[in-house]
Image (cartoon, helix red, strand yellow):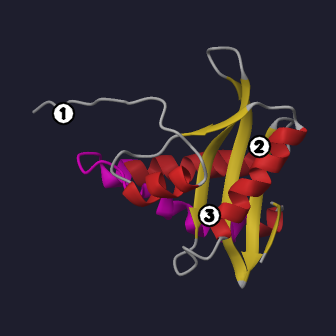
Amino acid sequence: MQVRRYTEADRQAVLALAPRLAEGVAPWRSSKGVLAAVTGWVVEALARSTEPGRIVLVAEGDGIIGFVSGEQRTHWAGEHELYVGELVVAPGYEGQGVGRALMETAAEYAKLQGLKAITLDTGAANSNARAFYGRLGFAEEDVKLTKTLS
């Protein structure tokens, strides 16, 4: 496996992985709306991947087996950080180090940019992702609460 920067030739393979971002979303959310949103996030990340402060990396093995996108942001407390918008590993490749390799490469990029942290969001119901990020040393910082109305 090799982790490298995204190129336009990777577009279709990366977009094919986008629906995985809809996994682990709260059950009261519209599945059609969630799928449209996550696909839009990936399309935007790819379109802006060459802009300063942005990065999209792909893991290549037997084709594209994962990707991560990130952008530099300033936290409301003032620290500069890399915000990871999307991390996806292809089905059948989970638990094989693909996600870890993508996140480690993103962390190397962040350090080279002089950034102080990496932040990301994931669904509270996405226990696999939360456990994965915990193993990488991420700590839960914010909690979002929702009450559905009938």
Closer to us: 104 or 84:
104
Task: Name the amino acid, label 1.
Answer: Thr
Task: Name the amino acid, label 3.
Answer: Leu
Classify 10 Å Cα crowding around label 1: few (below 14), some (14-19), many (20 and above).
few
**Measured Cα–Cα span from mark 2 to mark 3:** 14 Å
Of callouts 1 and 2, the N-terminal one:
2
Instruction: Identify whether 4 is placed above or below 136.
Output: below
Q: Does residue 134 appear to the left or right of 113 in the view shown?
A: left
* Residue 105 drawn in magenta: no
Task: Name the amino acid, label 2.
Answer: Arg
* Residue 26 drawn in magenta: yes
Closer to us: 126 or 136:
136
Q: Locate residue 78: give its quadrant.
A: top right
Query: Which quadrant of the rendered structure holds the N terminus?
Result: bottom right
**Measured Cα–Cα span from mark 1 to mark 2:** 34 Å
The answer to whether any part of residue 139 appears in the image is yes
User: Dot 1 lies on which element?
Assistant: loop
Q: Which residue is mark 3?
A: 15
- Magenta span: 11-33
Q: Does residue 146 appear to the left or right of 91 in the view shown?
A: left
* Residue drawn at the location 49% of the way across and 62% of the way down: 19
Instruction: Identify whether 126 is placed above or below 99.
Output: above
Q: Which residue is mark 2?
A: 48
Classify 10 Å Cα crowding around label 3: few (below 14), some (14-19), many (20 and above).
some
What secondary structure characterizes most of the magenta part? helix
Closer to us: 21 or 142:
142
Residue extending farthest right: 112
User: Dot 2 lies on which element?
Assistant: loop
* Residue drawn at the location 72% of the way across and 80% of the way down: 63
Residue 47 locus on image (x, y percent): 74, 47
Q: Which residue is mark 1?
A: 148
User: Dot 3 lies on which element?
Assistant: helix
